[in-house]
Amino acid sequence: MSKINLLPWREERKKAQNLSYYVQLGGVVGLSIVAVILIDMYLSHRITVENANISYINAALKDIRSEVVEVQGLQQDKKQLYTRMSVIQLLAVDRTSIVRLFDAIPAVLPENIYLTEMSRKEITEEQTNHNLETSLTKSNSQENEKNNTDLAVVTPKGYLVYLEGVSLTNGSISVLMKNLENIKWITDLKLNEVAINKDGVGLNFKITFTQSLIIGSD
């Protein structure tokens, strides 16, 4: 029986297998490199896009900050103007307050009462712009603007009014107190003293109240 030498065939098959392995390995490495390159290009593109977006947002924020500063300046100018207008309004009301008082007191005096003295003392205070706006908002139903900076102004707050008189009965004094309470611009109403008249007829009384300067009240 003749002998067959299989060594050359085996060596050739081994070489073919090695060649196939290296080709496959090279293909995998090549694809990996291509994939890495593509991913790097995609990430670089995304980074460029995001950087452009960030630059756009920063520029927009810068413009917005400038607009906010401008608006704050306009609000402060508006607040100063409103304060001046408020002071002018209060002073205008103050000029007519004495006439209002003289018109109101005789109208609320009941029978059996007459006044012997009436005087008033001005009450002033240093108010901030915010407080001034708050008081006017309550009377005029205007919107109260609130900012961080307030302006201090001295404005007439009202008048402390003193009334002295004689009444024939306690009931007449009670009626007078009730009538005064119904007047919107009268606050802090107090009956300070009631005493029998020296002549023995009637009662001496002393009343104090605050005449507030409320714009738009009757």
Image (spheres, rainbow, N blue to C red):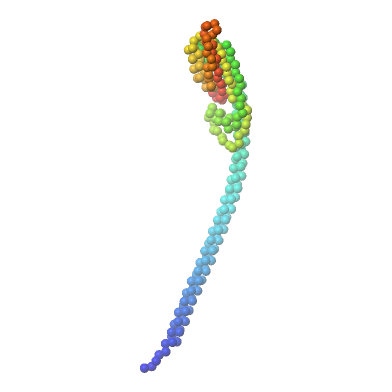
**Residue drawn where x is 56% and y is 15% of the image:** 163
Q: Quadrant of residue 3?
A: bottom left
**Which residue lies most toward the bottom here?**
1
Q: In this figure, what is the number of numbered marks?
A: 0
- Among the 4 quarters of the image, the one containing residue 89: top right
Q: Is residue 178 left or right of residue 148?
A: left
- Residue 178, given in percent of the width and then of the height, sits at 49, 17
The residue shown at (62%, 36%) is: 77
Residue 81 in picture, x, y percent from top left: 62, 32
Q: Do we see residue 47 in this rendering? A: yes
Residue 144 x, y percent position in the rendering: 55, 33
Q: Quadrant of the N terminus?
A: bottom left
Q: From the viewer's side, name the closer residue of 68 and 129.
A: 129
Q: Residue at x 61, y 25 (%)?
A: 124
User: 78 above or below 93?
Assistant: below
Q: Is residue 85 visible?
A: no
Query: Relative to residue 102, is residue 14 depicted above or below?
Result: below
Task: Give coordinates of residue 19: x percent, y percent.
Answer: 48, 79
Q: Residue at x 57, y 56 (%)?
A: 51
Which residue of the protein is positioned furthest toward the left in this rendering?
Answer: 1
